[in-house]
Image (cartoon, helix red, strand yellow):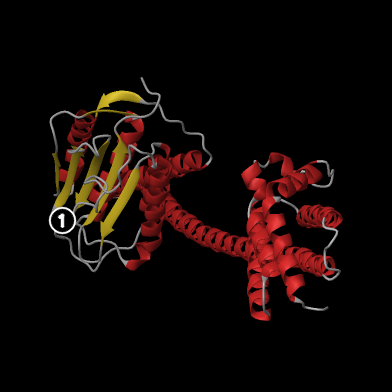
Amino acid sequence: MADTKRTRVQLRALADHLARRREAILEAWRLATDIDPEVTSAAASTRNQFIDHIPDVLDAFEDRLRAQDPEEKAEARAEQKEWAAEHGTHRWQQGYRLTETMREWGHLQLCLLTELERYSAQQVELEPEVLPVARRELARLANDGVCASASRYTQLQQSEAAGRLYDLETALDALHGMEIERAEGWRRAAHDLRGSAHVIVNASSVLTREDLPDTKRTEISHALSVAATALSKLLTDLLDHARLEAGHEQRNVQAFDAARLVKEFCETARQLAADRNLFLKCEGPASLEVEGDAVKVQRILQNLVLNALQATQSGGVLVTWEAGSSPTDSHQWALCVQDTGAGFTSDAMPLRQELKDATEGVREVEESPQSDHSSSLSASPAPTLDSQSRGNGRRLPAGEGIGLSIVKRLCELLDASIELQSATGQGTTFRVIFPRHYPGSS
């Protein structure tokens, strides 16, 4: 190729001509793509979405025609490849198949080639080297576009596949962990059921003896009653848990006074606390009008209070309730159950994680312009009470674990979040944050 000054001037003139004809070239490209039956994704694109980075690619192509030295040519080609790759990314994001993107590049090449031939026919004094140079640059353009787009498609497919593999592995790990926790829960429940049944069988057998002293008969009868009550409660909890997991429970939203509900329950449970030489106190505003499922709120309260009393050897349980005190949390109210027990050991960490997951899951569902989880109600739980119970912390009995799992499921059903604060040698605090109103409720 004779790289004469006249040839360079005419190549620059050709580049300027292509720049002036840009809109016509792009329109011809769009029309050619529209009538191609193999490119169906283009029909759903707006003009700007369709054109995308192609003007930048054409800028780089024209810069190569204008380039005066190899360094300028190399720089322009690097830009050409970069914009071509970005175009490939955009087409991937639009849902184009790779074959569609390849055919688009072919149509663009033909449109530019037609423009070059038209220009050559109009310029009778065109140097013979100009058109071959332009055609070679056009061939490089098409080759760069096809290769860069295909390479980017490959990278994105690999990244997507890696992401799917990671998500699948994470899901499988989580599922495996859930199965282990569930199996452990059922194992403990079965152990408790077997223990209660064993007590009932033994006590019933002893009671049939005619020579049994009355004092002993009374003692065994009491043990039989306790075991039967525990067995009945555990079976009821297992049934409730199964119904919640199966999605058979529905929420029935009505207006009610949460303060009245909590106080009335605490009155009925106070004797149970007194029988264990524990206190049961409740504190909160005299009235708290809310919307929700009062029956399920009471079930949550009942499980938390009874578990707290069971976990506490000395001291007692404090139940509090409050409404949001600022405009940002006025759409919420909170129920808090604190005990002076010995706190949870590390064996209860699966429960802590489960409750944490429930809290985060519900908050994602609740995410809306009206929700502000940085408000006071959504802050850290109330601090634990000082422990007054002996021991270095407690494991989580199966019956209690099922009860707390029921609480978690009920919270999910009521769009409520639950928080746990506990440590070995400290009391335990459960805090449930309920919506004060539900969309669409009367």
Residue found 19% across the figure and 43% down from its top: 319
Vertical order, 322 against 139 (above or below)? above
Residue found 79% across the figure and 66% down from its top: 134
Quarter holding residue 328: top left
List x then y, in percent, for residue 377: 23, 44
User: Which quadrant of the rendered structure holds the N terminus?
Assistant: bottom right
Q: Image check: 281 left or right of 345? A: left
Total numbered labels: 1
Vertical order, 274 against 188 (above or below)? above
Q: Nearer the viewer, residue 42 or 308?
A: 42
List x then y, in percent, for residue 17: 71, 55
Q: Image check: 244 left or right of 4? A: left
Residue found 35% across the figure and 38% down from its top: 369
Residue found 23% across the figure and 46% down from its top: 337
Amino acid identity at mark 1: Leu
Q: Image check: 315 left or right of 162? A: left
Quarter holding residue 422: bottom left
List x then y, in percent, for residue 442: 36, 19
Q: Image check: 3 left or right of 393? A: right
Q: Which residue is mark 1?
A: 385
Judging from the image, what secondary structure is the residue with disc 1 in?
Answer: loop
* Mark 1, other Cα within 10 Å: few <14 / some 14–19 / many ≥20: some
Q: Nearer the viewer, residue 188 or 262?
A: 262
List x then y, in percent, for residue 186: 49, 55
